[in-house]
Image (cartoon, rainbow, N blue to C red):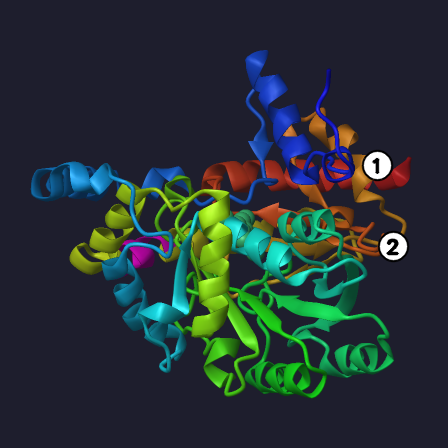
């Protein structure tokens, strides 16, 4: 017998992972795909030596305690360290009890979905947005409504109109304010402040997802929306997936004490606690190693890769292409000439062993057909310079068909 429930039977595979599966199938046949589709940080730069040393040290100093059952809210020294860490984003008014350690930001988003979405709830998102979040919100029954963006991020006038006209309960407004996945855009300071005010006026919450904030090519880190939150309307979600390594699965949620307590009860019923060793690895890495030096190395590499990609796209993509040059993060969003269907075009391009993510995957309303997201963090400069012109040529050929 196959297990079955309304919830389970409604689940579908994640759209981006279906591309990953295609790439893996080719790899099994010995064909290496140059993938601009991933959302991964580059594993060449993971701080393996430091992590190895830290792990030895933790076992030596803490023995079995390091792999014993532990508190559901997280490893206190890490929570305390994150209070300091959040000052990088000008979040100054929290203590460690405002923080819940999660197994990556994704688990935090799942907890917020479980805890805040009720039947008939709406979740408002940027359009386009991160499909992993949209899939999670939908799986807990939310209706997703998208707000269009411009170079300053989510449009506040459109959002306000939507909030005014909305008859259903808005569980929360989800935003990736810094170097957004997929567009690479940042929300302006003015809009950050406005968003907090709108959440207060219309009695809802903001979920601020910030995994890319520190990957800033000019080194400037924007103040988090949470830093303007005088009402307790913003729940912040952090992660070390893009700055240290995603497989460690360390993220955190920041909210008021009572909300955190409720989320801890949820965690007790879900997975009891986050992996002990990983929490200690991240704590010691941030505190005792050269995290800022590491970050600088990664940022320099990604910036160069972005530059090579932007130049190649401009030189080789068809007329009518528009590139958003990201100031940080891992992604470049490319609008192709009207009439392009990037989803339909995928297999045509894939013949050349090149992959990207079609824009439709990020849009909650069927738009984004003529767009694609290109990742520049995982492919070296040479491969970018070699393959982007091939991609450009394939797009031109597709458009001639
Ligand atoms: N939020 C966004 C915007 C992301 O892009 C990702 C990962 N691609 C996540 C959350 C999930 O991150 P984590 O590895 O911390 O679960």
Q: Which residues are magenta?
A: 292-298
Q: Which residue is mark 2?
A: 338
Location of the N terminus by quadrant is: top right
The local crowd at label 1, few if under 14, some if 14 to 19, many if 20 or more residues have their Cα within 10 Å, is: few
Provide residue 250's location: percent of width, then percent of height: 39, 50
Q: Quadrant of residue 325?
A: bottom right
Provide residue 334's location: percent of width, then percent of height: 70, 54
| Left-right relation of 235 to 338 | left
Provide residue 100's location: percent of width, then percent of height: 41, 60
The answer to whether 190 is drawn above or below residue 37 in the figure is below
Q: Is 293 contained in the magenta span?
A: yes
Q: Earlier in the sequence, mark 1 or mark 2?
A: 2
Dominant secondary structure of the magenta stretch? helix
The answer to whether 18 is drawn above or below residue 373 in the figure is above
| Left-right relation of 242 to 180 | left
Give the total of numbered labels. Answer: 2
Q: Which residue is mark 1?
A: 344
Q: Say which element carries label 1.
A: helix
Would you say the beta carbon of the disc 2 residue lies within 8 angstroms of ligand 1?
no
Provide residue 215's location: percent of width, then percent of height: 43, 61
Q: Say which element carries label 2.
A: loop
The structure residue drawn at horizontal position 80% and vertical position 40%, both measured from the top left corner, is 343
Q: Nearer the viewer, residue 232 or 291?
A: 232
The answer to whether 193 is drawn above or below residue 284 in the figure is below
């Amino acid at each position: 017998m196959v297990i079955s429930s309304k919830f389970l039977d409604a689940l579908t595979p994640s759209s981006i992972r279906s591309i990953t599966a295609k790439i893996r199938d080719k790899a099994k046949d010995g064909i290496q795909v140059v993938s601009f589709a991933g959302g991964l940080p580059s594993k060449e730069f993971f701080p393996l030596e430091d992590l190895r040393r830290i792990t030895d040290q933790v076992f030596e100093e803490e023995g079995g305690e390091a792999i014993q059952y532990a508190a559901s809210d997280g490893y206190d020294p890490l929570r305390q360290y994150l209070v300091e860490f959040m000052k990088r984003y000008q979040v100054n008014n929290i203590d460690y009890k405002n923080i819940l350690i999660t197994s990556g930001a994704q688990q935090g988003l799942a907890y917020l979905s479980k805890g805040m979405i009720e039947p008939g709830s709406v979740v408002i998102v940027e359009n386009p947005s991160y499909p992993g979040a949209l899939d999670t919100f939908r799986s807990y029954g939310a209706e997703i409504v998208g707000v269009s963006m411009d170079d300053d991020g989510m449009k506040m006038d459109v959002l306000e109109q939507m909030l005014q006209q909305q008859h259903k309960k808005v569980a929360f407004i989800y935003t990736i304010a810094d170097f957004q996945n997929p567009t690479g855009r940042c929300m302006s300071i003015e809009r950050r402040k406005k968003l907090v005010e709108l959440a207060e006026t219309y009695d809802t919450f903001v979920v601020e997802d910030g995994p890319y904030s520190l990957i800033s090519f000019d080194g400037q880190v924007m103040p988090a929306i949470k830093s303007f939150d005088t009402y307790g309307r913003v729940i912040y979600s952090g992660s070390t997936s893009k700055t240290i390594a995603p497989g460690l699965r360390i993220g955190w949620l920041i909210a008021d004490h009572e909300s955190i307590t409720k989320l801890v009860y949820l965690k007790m019923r879900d997975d009891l606690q986050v992996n002990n060793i990983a929490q200690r690895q991240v704590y010691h890495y941030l505190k005792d190693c050269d995290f800022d030096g590491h970050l600088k190395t990664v940022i320099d590499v990604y910036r160069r890769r972005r530059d090579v990609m932007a130049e190649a796209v401009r030189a080789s993509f068809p007329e009518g292409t528009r590139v958003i040059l990201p100031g940080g993060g891992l992604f470049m969003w490319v609008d192709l000439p009207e009439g392009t269907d990037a989803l339909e075009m995928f297999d045509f391009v894939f013949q050349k062993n090149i992959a990207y993510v079609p824009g439709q995957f990020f849009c909650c309303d069927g738009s984004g057909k003529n767009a694609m997201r290109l990742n520049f963090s995982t492919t070296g400069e040479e491969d970018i310079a070699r393959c982007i012109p091939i991609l450009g040529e394939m797009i031109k050929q597709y458009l001639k068909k």
